[in-house]
Amino acid sequence: MSDTRQKVIQKKLPREVYSALKNVVGEQWIHESRSVVETYSKLSIEGGSFVKKHEKDPHVLPACVVLPASTDDVQAIVKICNRYHVPFIPFTNGQVFCNPTTQDPTLIIHFSRMNRIIKIDTQNMSATLEPYVDYAQLQAEAMKRGLWNGGTPLATTVCKLASQFAFAGLWQTDLKYGLLNRNIISVKMVLPDGEILSTGSRCIPRAGDFWEYGPGPDLMGLQRSGLGTNGIVTEITVKLHAWVGDDALPEIPGGRPSLKHVHDAKYDSPPEPLKNHKLLWVEFKDLDTQLKAMREIAHSGVGIGLNATGVYSAFYCSQTQEMTVQRCKEHFFPDWNCYVILANTTSDQQIAYEEEVIRQIIAEVGGTFLSETHKPEVLKALQPWNYDCIRHSTGYRMNRKFYANAWLPVGPLEEAKTTSREWKKALDLFGEIDITDRGGADDTPFVYALQRGHFCLFETDNYPDPVLPEEIKKAQAYGIYGAAVVTKYDLGPQLMAFVNVEPFTTMFPEAGPNAHLFMRKIRQVFDPNSVAAPGRQVFTEQEWQQFPAEIKAAVNAMRELNGMPRVE
Amino acid sequence: MTYYEPKPHKKFFEKTLEDYRDSIWGCARCNWCQNHWAWNVKSAEYSEICPAFHEFRIFPYAGMGKMHIARALLEGDFDYEDAPEVVKFLYTCTTCGACELNCQRLQDKEPLQVNETLRARLVKDGIGPMPEHRNLLKSVKNYDNPWMQPRTQRDRWARKIKIKNIEKEPAETLFFVGCTVAFDNTQWHVAQNTATILLGAGVDLGMLGTKEVCCGSPVARIGDRDTFFDLAQRNIDMLNKTGAKEIVTFCPGCFKALSHDYAEVPDVPRLQAAVYHSSQYFDRLITEGKLTFSRPVNKRVTWHDPCHMGRHCGIYDEPRRVLEAIPGINLVEMERIKDQSWCCGGGGGARTAFMDFAQKTAAKRIGEAKKTGAEAIVTSCPFCEQNIGDALNAMNDEMEIFDLTDIMIKAMYSREV
């Protein structure tokens, strides 16, 4: 640890670069004062940036923040960055991988001014958005027109769709609608060298924006989950689907929640199911039965969403940290469970029919529905999901200190058992940090059934105290162990990008799918000056050299622990 | 296995940044401090909730940014001389509390409390408040009111109303008028209306007259805790001495100070009387049949929730019930209401120091109100009325703004008081 009162001084951009940027956006929209850059430096769930804060590492501080208003602005900014070799980080909410890891003065391009819904095309069922538009905004406007985009991320509804495109865009309703990434019609991007790329049919003059394929090579596939490596999205056109609920989510009859010090129970009435939607919760005796039931339901073709949640229900559906911990201790929510989201998307009788199918499956596999006669108090406590399954709002209900270094492997449904078993091993190996770390070991990992259950995502997490760097480092050890597990068991890519990201890409080169190896080659083509989103999807040699030696050593220790050769 | 032990309770005004260390390190950047609770979002246009972030678009203006600034100051990553702009960021906040509500709902954290604690630290260190606030503080210290007015002028609004001076004649209910309405003759009507309605309903009402002193809310919000503690002590002593069983006030700032803030001041006695916002009191009188409205007021109106009355103190339903009890009133709601109401821009010292910003924020509220088709905005806060009223004037807009009591008086008497 460094001297606790030592100041942390940011590097500044050369004056000529600053002036050039100021000329693009105007003085009001460029900031380099110390307190402004501070607010763009510590991220949400990225343990590394917290450790760096404790260590007083100045490299987490960007040099400058610039706020463009248009694609032209972005293009001009990127060209300046190329001219002067200034690394830049595209930035929306700053939740995950926006860390300015570079040791050179780095520019943050914050998109908060680019927040317009450009168009909702009811004929072609699509919406075109600027990069700062979030799911809540899109859904609110689309629902008025009888449409919606098909889901919101489990993280939070205020995620921006353009950011999600750079990762994957995981929804609770992936069972039917797939990831955001599979719901994109086109993007307009500023490439790392400042060129503008349009994809899909919008790049054909006067053809319109209705089809994801263009006349030439499909460059959108290269950008999907690209983490900003190959450019910045400035416009995104997403598919819309039929919405069968009301034109807005109904007000909760009891009112809206109040502050704790003026708390009134009437303001915490959880919502009833939405019109034409229904949630079914099922409890199982063990993980095997849970997974068997989920497999059968997924393959039966019913429902728009199918997931299982363990410790997360305690977080999402409890009002305070104390309540969360108490419910975890008591195993208030069923350890082994799943929930199915049903909707009348094609017929008024659809929910009734599909519920009957699910009841038959559960009767065969074994399981008990939460109901008025079986754990009604638990069913009542789970009611926030009635709205959250459509517009996820409690998803960042931490009610916990912090969470970091999640395991998010992808694989066939059965691999939930691998995750659970290995998470238990990690708990024994490294020791628990918080009571809730046992989520995923003593109860189900968070399981998301994607694309009709052909593959799933399994989530387990650490909950370190951010004030204690030792705890965060311990959580990082879990993270590295998780990467080793993913590699050892040939699971899908770590993290929500659905492609491997740095530093895992370099440290676990065996892990697939290995699109990043292709990206490594082409980064030089797209980004000849290595200025775009440094250190995200692929390291340059220089970025790798700058990566902390102790992390490299920890990775090799973990590789050896899992019978893998060292990476040099 | 670690269990996080709850910390021993400390009163809010005793807390320092150190007490928020866990909270400020744990900010998850979820961004809900800037956004309308998503279940209630009905349009893209009105999906944001933080007026300062909405206007300036960078994070230091949001609750989240304050948490990050607080962390850096607490850990010594920078100090005021490295970042003099911090003062502006902290004082642009209207203390509307939307960030606090959403953050408590999701994260169990307190960005507004952190901001107010930061302000207190700035004042203590001689860095804050904004220069525009200094006259206000001097005035409170010298004249017991923030508006540089002599004490003797405080009861001028009541010259034509027969109301007990509680120091001379005991009364069951004390009317705490507040400085803004008492000294601003354009707002006297609110005090006059309130007293008329209460007296008309048979309430045994008294007031402190020229002896009333500032509740301390403005200085508390600005961060001058020493002055606030002094005012709290004086007010509690004086109010307890009156023997009144109830205190009624219509100013949300006074109401929050008396009903919530004083209890958070260290080493002061409890206020003996029960404190009511006037809308709560009116609602009760209506329920008891002591207050009736005989004359229709044919207006389509929308209710603007003052932040320090609604979000801070949980009073949402009572004023709505009062309006709905008035014949002819057609109450229509804006998109952002109750705990997700959009601030008028006038609170927390923002109007004093950043008038342009305050007016732009009010203009946005007016735009939202107009979309309901309402002819008038009704509220119950002198600051909201002033700030929205000024914006309406500047826009030369025909929409009207009324205090709740204006509408009530119209429904009770053949002439306006």
Image: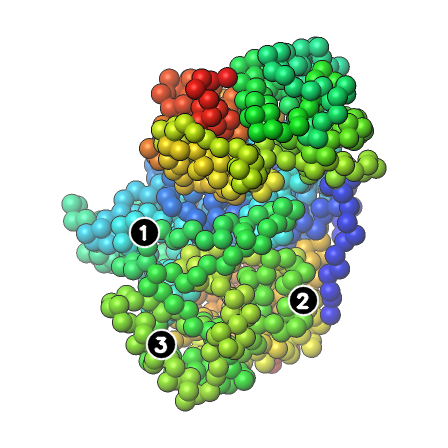
Amino acid found under the numbered disc labelled 2: Gln
Disc 1 from disc 3: Cα separation? 25 Å
Q: Which mark is residue A326?
A: 2
From the top left corner, tell me how far across and down residue B373 is, in percent: 33, 33
Q: Earlier in the sequence, mark 2 or mark 1?
A: 1
From the top left corner, tell me how far across and down residue B5 is, in percent: 75, 60
Residue B67 in view, yes or no = yes
Compared to residue B177, the image places residue A481 above or below, namely below
Circles 2, 1 touching at the beta carbon (< 8 Å): no
- Do the dots labelled 1 and 3 sit on one chain? yes
Circles 2, 3 touching at the beta carbon (< 8 Å): no
Disc 2 from disc 1: Cα separation? 38 Å
Amino acid found under the numbered disc labelled 3: Glu
Q: Please indicate whether residue B123 sits to the left or right of residue A103 in the image.
A: right
Q: How many marks?
A: 3
Q: Please indicate whether residue B91 sits to the left or right of residue B240 in the image.
A: left
From the top left corner, tell me how far across and down residue A323 is, in percent: 65, 62
Badge 3 marks a residue whose secondary structure is helix
Give the residue drawn at x 52%, y 78%: A374
Q: Quadrant of residue B327?
A: top left
